[in-house]
Image (cartoon, helix red, strand yellow):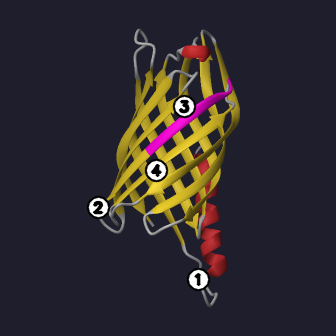
Amino acid sequence: MFRLWLVLCGVLVCVQGVYADAEEQPSWRAEIDVSYSEANPDYKPFSNGEGVALHAVAFWHNWQVFGRLAEAEFQPSGEVAGGTMKDWWALGLGYERPITERWSVRGRSAFQGLTRKRSTTRSSEQGYEFAVGAGFSPTQAWQFYLDVGVMDVLIDDWSLSFEGRYRMSERVYLVARLRDYADFDLTYYEGGIGLRF
């Protein structure tokens, strides 16, 4: 996973270097945040998993390249019951289009994977997720996003994600996220702090 983050950083440096001497430099920036992550199987007898989540995104005009890694070991329920899951990662591309000063719409696609352990075996599963959503910024400091998606990791499933951000300064922000999966019977809760570059 560390190599994937290095590749993302390398892409940012290359994009900046290519356009550094151009007359009109493109609008680009990057964000990275770290959060406390709790994975909550909706089946009550199964305990929650706790860990850390790392999110990174690079913006270039309306385009986004993003990555996510959530590490919280838990016993899944629903249609994927059995064994334990540890990490869930995603790498993707998105496009966000402002429609008013406060509202925007966006689409995202991601290649993602998770690690699953069953007794003495360990396996990695990969698949795709496609999501559409909307963003709302009531003030310059606050931002909210809601996305609905479909995915095919282990099973075909629906996903719903909500993100709220508060910009403390030009460089620092607080973030809270909720990611819910229907037939996975699972909800991730995340809260943390991030930096903008």
Callout 3: SS: strand
Q: Nearer the viewer, mark 4 or mark 1?
A: 4
Around disc 4, counting alpha carbons within 10 Å, would you say few (fewer than 14), some (14 to 19), or many (20 or more)?
some
Q: Which residue is mark 1?
A: 25
Placement of 9 over or under 4, stated as above or below: below
Mark 1 lies on a secondary structure that is loop
Q: Is residue 150 left or right of residue 30?
A: right
Mark 2–mark 1 distance (CA, rounded to whole Å)? 26 Å
Q: Secondary structure at mark 2?
A: loop
Amino acid carrying label 1: it is: Gln
Q: Of circles 3 and 1, which is in front?
A: 1
Answer with left or right where residue 143 lies relative to residue 13. Answer: left
Relative horizontal placement of residue 108, taking residue 47 as reference (left or right): right
The residue indicated by pointer 3 is: 87
The first of marks 4 and 2 along the sequence is: 4
Q: Which mark is residue 168?
A: 2
Residue drawn at the location 64% of the way across and 56% of the way down: 7
Q: Position of residue 132 (x, y in %)?
A: 60, 48
Mark 3 or 1, nearer chain start: 1
For the point 47% across and 55% down, which residue is it? 135
Find out whether the residues at labels 4 and 3 contact each other: C-beta distance under 8 Å: no
User: Could you tell which of marks 4 and 3 lies nearer the N-terminus?
Assistant: 3
Residue position marked by numbered label 4 in the rendering: 145
- Residue at the (53%, 45%) spot, across then down: 147
Q: Name the residue: 55% across, 25% down.
A: 182
Query: Which residues lie in the magenta part?
Result: 155-162
- C-beta proximity under 8 Å, tags 3 and 1: no
Where residue 157 sits, quadrant-wise, is top right
